[in-house]
Structures are given as C-alpha cells and as structure tokens.
Amino acid sequence: MSTDEFPTDRPAVVTCGLPYANGDLHIGHLRGYIGADAFNRALNTLGQQSIYVCGSDMHGTPVAVNAEQEGIDPEEFALRWHEQYRETFPQFDVEFDNYGHTHDETNTELTTEIVRTLDEEGYVYEKEIQVAYDPEADQYLPDRYVEGTCPYCGAKARGDECDEGCQRHLEPGEVEDPRSSITGNPAEYRERAHKFFRVSEFEEYLTEFLDDLEGTSNARNQPRQWIEDGLQDWCITRDMDWGIDYPGEDGDDLVLYVWVDAPIEYISSTRQYSERVGEDEYDWEEVWTDEGEIVHVIGRDIIQHHTIFWPAMLEGAGYNAPRGIAATGFITINGKGLSTSRNRAIWAKEYLDEGFHPDLLRYYLTTTGGLQQDVDFSWSAFREKVNGELVGTIGNFWYRSLLFAHRNYDGTPDAAVSEEVRERIEGAVGEFREAVNDYSLRGVGGAAARLAGFGNEYIQRNEPWKLVDDDPETAARVIRDCVQIAKAVAVLLEPIAPGKARALWEQLGEEGDVADAGLEAALAAPPRTFDEPDELFEKIEDDRVAELEAKLEARVEEASADETETESHDATADEDEGVTDELEPLTDDRIDFEHFQDVDLRVGRIEVAEGIEDADELARLEVDVGFETRQIVAGIKQLHDLDELAGKKCVVVANLEPAELFGYESNGMVLAAGEEADLLTTHGDAVPGERVR
C-alpha cells in the first residue's frame, strides 16, 4: 500500500462489495457499483493503470434458504441471479474488466489455498462453541436460519448480524432467544467444534493499517472502536452443505463462512482478468502481492468485514492490504428507509423501463452529498438535479456553444484559446485531480459542472452574437474558447456520465473514445469541423414526476397491505438495507411555549471541523454564529467527512451551558437528526446568527 498521489506507476484495482445472488438490484445497490465504476474511470482519466473487478456472491444461508423455498439447487438459484446482474450492470455503463462469482473454480481454489496458509501459519484453531440447533428438523442452524434478539442492543437479529439495530457482526451462539427459520420453533444451543481465525493477534497490525488507510472517514474511524473494545477471534466455518468446503480432513462436514470466500473473489477476479489479457498487460500478482494499489468501495454496514477481518486475512496469508476503502451511505426513498418487502425501492429495471438515460441516475447518485453521506431519493429531487445541473448548466452550455460554432464557423474557429480560459480549464483539471485523491465523486462531477457554469457565464458576458459582424476576430476567439471548454467538460464528466460525454465527443467529431482520453485532452485542440449538434439532455416535466410519485406510493401501499413474510436481507452487498423505517415514538411529555422560547436556536456556519485526537467520536468545530465564532465539540467524527463540513450551515443551541469534553470547552450544541447525525440546516439564505423560530 502506497501513499503516493494518484496516478502512480503501479497498477491499481478497484472493487465493490459483491452483489449477493439473492434478488433484484435497486438504486441502493447501484450507488456502490456506479460509484466504484466512476472512481475507476476517474483513475484512468488521471493516467493511472486501473481495472474494475467484482463478482456475484453465491454462498451463504440466504441463498440456501430461498433456493430451498423454490425447490431448486442453490447453485442453480444463485447462477440465475448472477446472469441477471451481468446483463443489468452494462445498462448503467457499469463496466467491469472482469465479473466472476465466488463458486467458480478460480475462487474455490484460491480460497482453499489461503485458508490452508492461514492454518499452516498457526492463525486457525478449533474450539467448541454453542451453535443453534433445531430438534424438529434435526439439524444445526447457521446464520440466517436463526432469528432472535441482539445481545448488544436488544433489536431483532438474524444469524450473523444485528440488521435492525446496532448492525454489529454476531458470532454463532450470540443471538438470544433463538428460533429456527425452518420450523419457526424455538431453537436450542448445542456444543459443536468449529474453526476460528486468530484476529486478536493482528491488533497492532490493524491499528497501523488504519493509520495509513485512505478513503472515507467512516471507514477509517469506526473500526478503531472495535479494536479498542478488544478484538474477538472470528468463527470461519458453518454447519451447512452450500459453500466452499473447509480444507483438510479435520474440516468434517463444515463449509467456510461466506465472509471468508467473498472478499477473496476480489483477488480471484483480478487474476482471471490477468490470465485473459496476459501478465505483460496487467499482472495480478504485482497488485496483490507486490506494490499495487487496491481500492474497495463498500456499503457502510460492511465496514467491519473490510477493515478488520479482511486485512487480517491478507496479512496472515502474505497479500497486500488495500490502500483505500470508501464506504457509501445508505439510500432512503422520500425520506423513509428503503424497504424491499414494502416495495419502497426504485428498482434498476423500473428506472430503465421509465425511459430515463442511465447517466441521469449516475449523476444524481454520485454528486448528491458526499460518498459516505446518506442520500434521499425522490423523483422531485431527481428532477431538480437533472433540470438544474444537467439540463440548465452542462447541457445548455454544450448545445449553445456548439450550435453557434457550427452555424457561424462550421465547427471550431481558427483562433487561439485565451489565457483566461486556459487557466480556468487548468484549474478545473486540478480540481478533478484533487477530488480523485480525496475519494470525492461529488468533487469529480463538481469540477465538470463548475467549468460548464463558467462557460455559460463567459459566453453571456462576451455576447459573441453581437461581435460576429462588428468584431469578428474577438467573436472567433470567444467561440474557440467555448468549444474548448465544452471539450474539457466532456473529459472531466466522462467518469460520472460516460454515455453523454461519449455523445458530446462524437458531436465534436473527435476520434476514439472519450473514456480513453486523459486529462491532457482537456486542452487539446478540437476538430476543425463538426456537424450541427443535438441537445443531449431533456427536461423532466412536473407532471411526469407527479405520475412517478403516484406509482411509487401505490406500490408501497399495496405491498404494505399484502406483506405476509419477513423481508430477506443481503449478508454481503445489500448495503442500503440497514436504513430502517422504524421511528422512535413521540413523547407524551409536553413543554409550554414559554419554555421553548428559552432555547436560543441560531443559524451557524461551520468554519473549521477536525477530529479530536484519541477521541473515537468527537470532533472540534469552529462555528460562526453571527456575533462570534464558537468552539463546539460534537460527536460526529465517525459519521461525517470532516473535510467537507467547512462552509456548511447548521442549527446551534446557542444558550447551552459550556461543558468540557476531552479537554476542550464546548460552547453550544449542533443539532442533528438520527443515529447518523444528519446535520440540521436551512433551505434558504438565512445568515449566521439569525434566530431559528
């Protein structure tokens, strides 16, 4: 793992959490796969040799349970979903260099080899543990065959995680009041020998690993608490038939836990790509065992697996650790938790059937909020994003510039790019480069959008339509500038909206694919002539949004009325499902208006946000409250990308008694909603110090 700025002279691989071969894809899934695709494309635009690999996660109890319910073999069940994913991803321009699955020969052999190495190195041992058992079905119950209560927070838990509460990983035997999902009867715990991986021996290594890790702050900070709490060794076997057999005679009838073989598919898929194109073009061993660059894009609910278990396995088996881990936030729908059982989701197929271009969704999901922040999808917000930024800014500039250039000059005018425009394009290229190294997809898209916004302002300021006759030389220079800006926007936007960038590239008459163009192409001269352009973005009308919202509401109501079974949850890649629509009930205790008036709520603007050393959750904020700048300590260190908070408005309790936290005086309180500390802000132009009433 290196810390050199991208691009480096070492090969890179970008991965995304494997889709669990167990159900349809929706926009919650797509946020991760599109995000990883965009990041890989951006690396390539920088000049970094990088590939994007993934694969379907075929194993685990949900596959076995659902296959059994359908009366078919688990492999047949999982392969059916695997093939559907292979067909769906390209429709959103998610282009994997290799897409395999965890049950194929490469991953089976590599998983067996890695587990044998861990065993030989002394990192695996056997221990008797309590395992749930169904007396009526006469079988042990792995993972999702067990339902009960989380021992840590008391919420409903299923198998290997508390998916409706604290989302902690749960070891076999930890679920309280277990019931069998096979018969519905109470289960009992019986002793059974299982294999354990000595994660606890890697505490020092993992601490150093996290110190060097790049990516989103939640992926870097959350694991530290687990290390401080004391690492527990990890049970890596399960009592079931479906999966990869534990190697060796003493494995009995156990299979490996799905979270052992699933991340190994990252290596296997890279290896398959290398074998297909040849090691001279791309050497998988250079990436995984030498000095390559490894970046994982994952969901927030699988941080523990990727920052504790996985790097410990890699270190123990002699492989490279990831350089960066970027964990996405969850997706909500109209402010409510995504729920597949209630059909409160925007399905991948549904989106395409509505006739929307995939780039519109790619742009919305990558540029709405930071990568690690939760994103609320609504058709009305989608319309505003598309109409305002894609149609009104980028599309408007592209069309008006190229149309004027074609009608007046048959293409690019014979003039030099002005110094002002050259410097502005160079600035946008710098913003793009910085955003990639900050793992900020919003910054990548923002660099292109801001440059297009400058282009609109530039053409409006110079009014070339008035100069064509009176000052033709200046008119030609202005339009030459605008065509260059249009081309530069296409280069910078390609990772986010590859289809539309490709279309603009073709309208310019450029040769090759914009995806193969590096940053230097942003200032390379466009073709001398090109045809009359088409408008690349179409406005979404209000009545169309009303129709879509009505459809969604009707589906949700119908599904809620007919709901008769528990919603299944992906153990590996259903990363957005951790959002629950269960809300804390309203309190019956009321306060009178006079007491409420005693609370002095003010609009604040965060000027500085930095983590407090040795504090897991606390951050020190400097907040402008109009009359002064206050220091406030807030428990948001693991829940926000602190680097992105500067300039953000928030709501502050200004008359709270000062308190000392971790040696810092906190002079106020920043208000936030929910467990993820969604900061309360203002919708309009309220200034710091203005009172909230």
Image (cartoon, grey):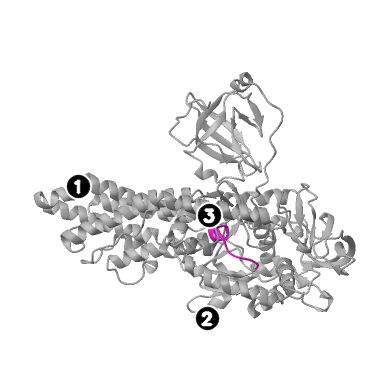
Q: Residue 389: where, in percent of width, then height? A: 38, 50
Are discs 2 and 1 less than 8 Å apart at CB? no
- Between disc 2 and disc 1, the foreground one is 1
Vertical relation: 561 (above or below) 18: above
Disc 2/disc 3 C-alpha distance (Å) = 45 Å
Which element is circle 3 on? helix
Q: Residue at 62% x, 29% y: name it.
A: 665
Q: Residue at 28% x, 63% y: name it.
A: 524
Q: Is residue 434 left or right of residue 189?
A: left
The disc at residue 276 is: 2
Q: Residue 278: where, in percent of width, then height? A: 51, 81
Residue 285 visible in the shown view = no
Disc 2/disc 1 C-alpha distance (Å) = 54 Å
Disc 3/disc 1 C-alpha distance (Å) = 45 Å
Q: Which residues are magenta?
A: 22-32
Amino acid type for the residue under numbered disc 2 = Arg
| Residue where numbered disc 1 is placed | 463
Residue 135 visible in the shown view = yes
Q: Residue 397: where, in percent of width, then height? A: 30, 53
